[in-house]
Image (cartoon, rainbow, N blue to C red):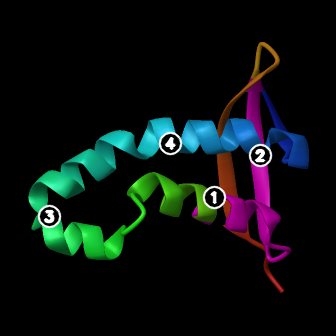
């Protein structure tokens, strides 16, 4: 496994990883919350919110994104805020 700096060409894969990773969490949240409250937080669905959040973080200069590569596939990521 290799850890490498994120490249723009990896955005689609990272978004897909994020949806798979967060799906059980959001399913659990939806079951625990009142459905109207849940929909007020995620009017377009949690997937839209999550994809926007991931893209925002990956394209923000103040964030540093590293990806894990195994067998030439992106299998994980780490994001941290750059220290000034």
First in sequence: mark 2 or mark 3?
2
Q: In terms of sequence position, does the residue under pointer 1 or pointer 3 come before the other?
A: 3
- State which quadrant residue 36 falls in: bottom left
Task: Point out residue 8 in the picture as x, y percentages from the top left corner.
Answer: 88, 49
Instruction: From the image, state whether disc 1 or disc 3 is nearer to you.
Output: 3
Residue 3: say if magenta: no
Label 3's element? helix
- In percent of width and height, residue 35 lies at 14, 64
CA gap, disc 4 and disc 2: 12 Å
Tell me whether the residue at label 1 lies in contact with that at label 3, contact meaning CB atoms closer than 8 angstroms.
Answer: no
- Residue 35: image tag: 3
Give how far apart the Cα atoms at labels 1 and 3 are: 24 Å
Q: Is residue 54 left or right of residue 9?
A: left
Query: How many C-alpha atoms fall within 10 Å of the one at disc 2: few (<14), some, or many (≥20)?
Result: some
Pick whichever, 47 or 82, lies toward us.
47
Foreground: 44 or 33?
A: 44
Instruction: Please tell me which residue is depicted at 84% across the width and 48% down the height of the picture.
Output: 6
User: Residue 53's x, y, as percent?
Assistant: 59, 65
Above or below, 84 against 21 in this view is: below
Q: Which residue is mark 4?
A: 19
Label located before the other in sequence (3 or 4)? 4
Label 2 to label 3: alpha-carbon separation: 31 Å
Tag 1: Cα neighbours inside 10 Å, few (<14), some, or many (≥20)? Answer: some
Q: From mark 1 to mark 2, how far is it between C-alphas?
A: 9 Å
Q: For marks 1 and 4, give the CA distance.
A: 10 Å
User: What range is drawn magenta here?
Assistant: 53-69
Of pointers 1 and 4, the one earlier in the residue sequence: 4
> Which residue carries the number 1 mark?
54
Q: Nearer the viewer, residue 37 or 23?
A: 37
Which residue lies under the disc numbered 2? Answer: 11
Compared to 12, does 78 lie above or below? Answer: below
């Amino acid at each position: 496994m290799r850890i490498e700096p994120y490249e723009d060409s990896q955005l689609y894969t990272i978004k897909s990883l994020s949806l798979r990773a967060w799906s059980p969490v959001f399913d659990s949240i939806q079951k625990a919350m009142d459905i109207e409250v849940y929909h007020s937080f995620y009017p377009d669905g949690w997937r839209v919110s999550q994809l926007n959040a991931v893209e925002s973080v990956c394209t923000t200069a103040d964030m540093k994104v590293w990806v894990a590569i195994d067998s030439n596939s992106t299998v994980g990521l780490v994001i941290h805020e750059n220290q000034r």
